[in-house]
Image (cartoon, rainbow, N blue to C red):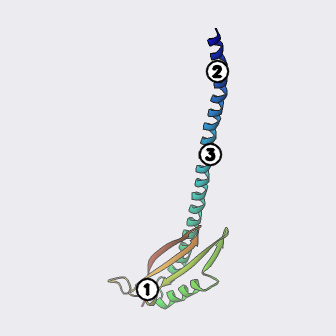
Amino acid sequence: MNFIQQLRKNKQGFLLVDAIIGVLVVAIGLAALAALYTYGIGVMVSADRQEKAVQIAAEKIELLKAADGHSSSDIKEIVEYINKNENNKLFQDGIEYQINAQGGAASLGNSYPGEDDLYLVRVEVKWTDPQQQALDLQTYIRTKD
């Protein structure tokens, strides 16, 4: 009888140990979910910043495409306009986007092989998120010279 009473006393402590282990497992699971959620937010913010960089570069490419059918000197004027200090930086949501454009025969060398009137134009956008990021869009523009 003494032995059975001793087993009953010892079993009363198992419920407390089970509860502590259960709370510990749930806490570890919640900590893992919180870390995953934080990582997901960071990826989403980074993708949003990259999307803004694509929009900026596409806007500048469209500005350069407006010179389609004009002379390469017109392309150079637009490139110079984009690269001016007041036009080559854009601040959005606390991030600085640095814009650099190149275009026309003099800035990129030769025209498209086999075509004397196609010139490469390129727009590069750089930003820090928290590491240096860069995006480069390029296209060819037909000129009359």
Observer-nearest of 17 and 58 = 17
Per the model, the C-alpha gap separating discs 1 and 2 is 84 Å
- What residue did someone put label 2 on? 10
- Residue 60 image label: none
Residue 16 makes an appearance in the image: yes
Per the model, the C-alpha gap separating discs 3 and 1 is 53 Å
Observer-nearest of 41 and 18 = 18
| Quarter of the figure with the C terminus | bottom left
Provide residue 87's location: percent of width, then percent of height.
Answer: 62, 82
| Residue 85 figure quarter | bottom right
Marks 3/1 in contact by CB < 8 Å: the verdict is no
Nearer the observer: mark 1 or 2; the answer is: 2
Amino acid tagged 2:
Asn
Q: Is residue 102 above or below residue 9?
A: below
Amino acid tagged 3:
Ala
- What residue did someone put label 3 on? 31
| Quarter of the figure with the N terminus | top right
Which numbered disc, 3 or 1, marks the residue that appears first in the sequence? Answer: 3
Amino acid tagged 1:
Leu
Q: Is residue 6 above or below residue 132?
A: above
Q: Is residue 10 above or below residue 117?
A: above
Q: Identify the residue at horizontal 51%, vertical 76% (top origin).
A: 124
Residue 71 makes an appearance in the image: no
For numbered disc 2, what is the local secondary structure?
helix
Which numbered disc, 3 or 2, marks the residue that appears first in the sequence? Answer: 2
Q: Identify the residue at horizontal 62%, vertical 53% (top origin).
A: 38
- What residue did someone put label 1 on? 108
Nearer the observer: mark 3 or 2; the answer is: 2
